[in-house]
Image: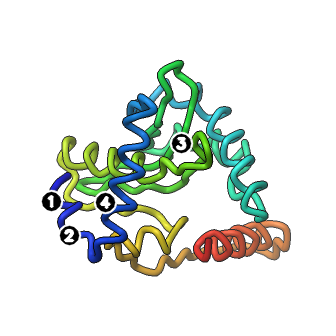
Amino acid sequence: MPDFVGRIPNEQARAEFQHQHHCGNALGLRLHTVSGSDLPSVLPDFHTLSQHQAQREGRPALYSRAMLTCLPRIPGALALLAEKPDGALADAFLGFRHGATLYLWAEAIAPGPGGESTFGWLLAESIRHAADTGARVLDAGRGHDQFKQHIGFTHVPLTTAIHLTGPNPRLLSSPRELGTALEVLARA
């Protein structure tokens, strides 16, 4: 972790990242990793937290319950949960491990006490988890892009190909809606 913090491009960003990590530690947060058959049990709380986040940020919700219920069937799927001392969920990432890469696909972030953000804590602990489990690459996802770029993350544009065997306007509208919601989130 000190290597990552030392590479944060400017002092202000470094201080903010360290402050958020300190706040999470002061709250007694702990990282809990969930995968396999245990994953379905955390998805309802993730969904609720992500819905509240979307409402606070005035944007469309990105993840439906139906979308999340498919997650456990995907090889390498996992959840990285920032848990409070009482076991309640503070923040969370859903992601995938494939080869030497940890992909942080979805996030659900709640404001901490007094409005303090603990997002930096979860991100720092995710970096630590990736390193501890042998990941050589961490794709930190696309949400909160400005914060991630500020602390030195870079990203590669994502493209998704959808092949329809026939006309299906309803199916075509779903990726368009998701794309619009992701663009709003990326600017947050």
Q: Amino acid at mark 1?
A: Asp
Direction left: furthest residue: 3
Q: Which mark is residue 91?
A: 3
Residue displayed at 26% across by 70% down = 8
Q: Position of residue 1 (x, y in %)?
A: 20, 52
Q: Is label 4 in a helix, a strand or a loop?
A: strand
State yes or no: discs 2 and 1 in contact (Cβ < 8 Å).
Answer: yes
Q: Which circle, 2 or 3, is nearer the viewer?
A: 2
In this rendering, the answer to whether 24 lies above or below 135 is: above
Residue wearing tag 4: 138
The earlier-in-sequence mark between 2 and 4 is 2
Q: Secondary structure at mark 1?
A: helix
For residue 124, which numbered disc appears in the image?
none
Which of 167/30 is in front? 30
State the image quarter where residue 33 is shown.
top left
Numbered disc in front, either 2 or 4: 2
Q: Residue at x 29, y 57 (%)?
A: 101
**Mark 1, residue position:** 3
Q: CA distance from mark 2 to mark 1?
A: 6 Å
Question: Can I make out residue 35 in this image?
Answer: no
Residue 63 coordinates in the image, percent (x, y): 68, 52
Pick the front one: 67 or 95 = 95
